[in-house]
Amino acid sequence: MKFASVSLALLGAATLVSGHPIKGRCRPSKGGANKPSYPITTPGTGYEPSQPIPTLTPGNGESPNPGYPAIPTPGSGTGAEPSYPIPTPTPGTGGNDNLPGYPSVPAPGNGNGGNPSYPTPGNEGKPYPTPGNGGNPSYPTPGNGGKPYPTPGNGTVGHPSYPTPGNGSQPTYPTFPLPGNGTKPGNGTTKRNTMTVLATNDIHTRLDQFNKGGTDCRQKDIDSNTCYGGAARIQYLVSKFRSERDDVVLLDAGDQFQGTLFFNVYGASASAEIMNQLKYTAMCIGNHEFDKGVEYASTFFKNLTFPVISSNIDLQTAPKLAEVGVKPYIVLKEYGVGIIGYITNTTSQITTGAKDIVFRNPVPVVQKYVDELQSQGIKRIICLSHNGYAQDKYLAENVRGLNLIVGGHSHSLLLNNQTVPGVEGPYPTEVTNPDNKTTYIVQSHRYGDYLGHVSLTWNDADELVNFTGESILLDQTIPIDNSTAAKVAEWRKGFAALTEEVVGQATADFPNAGCGAGECAIGNLIADSMLDNRKATGGQIAFVNSGSIRAALEKGDISVADVLTILPFGNSMIQFPYTGAQIMEVLERQAAGKSKAGVPLTSISQWAGLKFSYDAAAPEFSRVKSVVVVSSDGKEEPLDLNKTYQAVTNDFVAGGGDGIMPPVSAAPGDLQSDVFIAYVSKLKTVSPKLEGRISKI
């Protein structure tokens, strides 16, 4: 069938659309994965460790629970605080996938070990702290008497927000225009045959615009037209689509939580207000929704005005989710479309707040609900996934009856322009399913820098006959919704002081891309700060998980807000005795890319006081070829397997997080962010350096 292209136009921009006539075909999968036991992964960029991913649990693929204890963050009272990196990494060159995060800015007053500055958020376990009411005493709500949602003002503090859209081009990313004023769909039948899907994923509380590194836009970013995303741009674009079409469905693929000052100061309530304002059709649950525990997540879901779906969570192990109405799927009767949600079944290993929940292998679960929907006469089926690009391809190859998977979790950049740096695949990616038909997969990077857009057309026999799609870059050429921008600007006032408090200077950029694949300068600096903090107590070797490094450190002033953006999770320092043999095991696990239990590592370690080399081609657990311990005066000596060293890490890693090491017990010390602030303040100026701490032979 010949496909008639759709004309798109906005601000004179060129149109980039992929049109796909639909037909049955006998051909190999396009972009599909091989078919090992679930889950699998394929090489890509920008995702955490570059290591092979083994099968998690032989036989059924269900989420293994090693029983690591939850390591409570000081002052939180919940024991469910931080969660960690995006699971099931994709091997390749990518590193830490530029996952900047912003801070969980903690409530002052509960600091540990003499560093009173920025302790971990607590609020006595209350689900949503109201600024100014004692939960976050140092961040009063500006001018509204303690109400959680301030009246929008007319100015910003600290950083300018949303400049007037300009016409500058951005050399790295293509800009996709908006649809034009085509006719509204509708075929006069009971069941509509067209649907326009708009999609977001992995917003991580980026309510304001941000730069290419995922951190706050500064004036230099605005001047160079390198600011992206933000709730005001998303609101503008969604409203424009809705004004031109009456078949718009807005979906979110999870991970609204965790990563910016907006999350800590206003809890999940700011995200809930924005999502309700945008009038989402549905969202699936992401692993970071469990960062503060099931009860907190359930309160968030209860406050939403649209359905939350996830099919492969065993609700008997999370009854609170059932109480607030989480369902495996929804049916949009107007379109005759079923939407099934699912989440990575590694969530209990990578998110402390979900450690007691069972997450089932999504492949058989999704097939079960496809069959259930089809038995009800629903033949048009979309999945909303927080499972990662590679795993979505595997699922698409092995589940019958799917038209589209709207994905998230891996922060994958999918574009039709394959020359753009960091692109992992086409938008959409086509996979041949067991029906010998095409299942389309889309994902739109992270933080809301792109808005996913697809248009689907079915015939009266429920066959998908046309598909168009593109991921629209939300750069400064996209206008903003002024009322949303004003609301965000007012919210920023609650943490303006942190953006203005400068603690040091960086002579050059410290990228965080690559931290999950090898040595990185920002990892070295953080590990050095940890070792320096424990010098007085005999610390000799320090290591930090790459997944905790959520942003780059940019050249120029280093503010407290910058530090909390880089280290948002409120982790504490831990010191403990560790033998050379135990350290060697950690290094071998890092070289192998999996834990002792065979679970994939979701981070590697960045080191201070130690250098090692490894041969990736050598047999597993004999890959480490040399290890030297480096003393504070620079003297190097071989690691002695029989000697006991004083090791330093954070409480998440010490509790077994990311599978880096078996859990150890030790008293928590200073907050990691405070330690980094103190170190940078002492040095005054920092410069990036690579010293061969991790060498691949």
Image (spheres, rainbow, N blue to C red):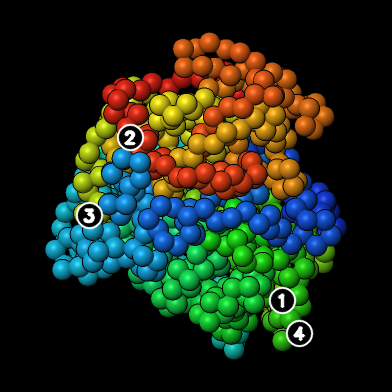
Disc 1 marks a residue whose amino acid type is Tyr
Provide the residue designation for mark 4.
375
Provide the residue designation for mark 3.
138
Disc 4 marks a residue whose amino acid type is Ser
Q: Helix, strand or loop at disc 1?
A: helix
Provide the residue designation for mark 1.
369
Provide the residue designation for mark 2.
677
Give above or below for 81 relative to 533: below
Q: Residue at x 53, y 61 (%)?
A: 353
| Label 3 vs label 4, nearer the camera | 3
Q: Helix, strand or loop at disc 4?
A: helix
Sequence-wise, which precedes: disc 4 or disc 2?
4
Give above or below for 255 relative to 496: below
Separation of marks 2 and 3 at Cα, in angstroms = 18 Å
* Residue 56: percent from left, percent from top: 75, 53
- Camera-nearest residue between 105 and 29: 105
Asked whether, in this view, residue 137 is left or right of residue 527, the answer is left
Separation of marks 2 and 1 at Cα, in angstroms = 50 Å
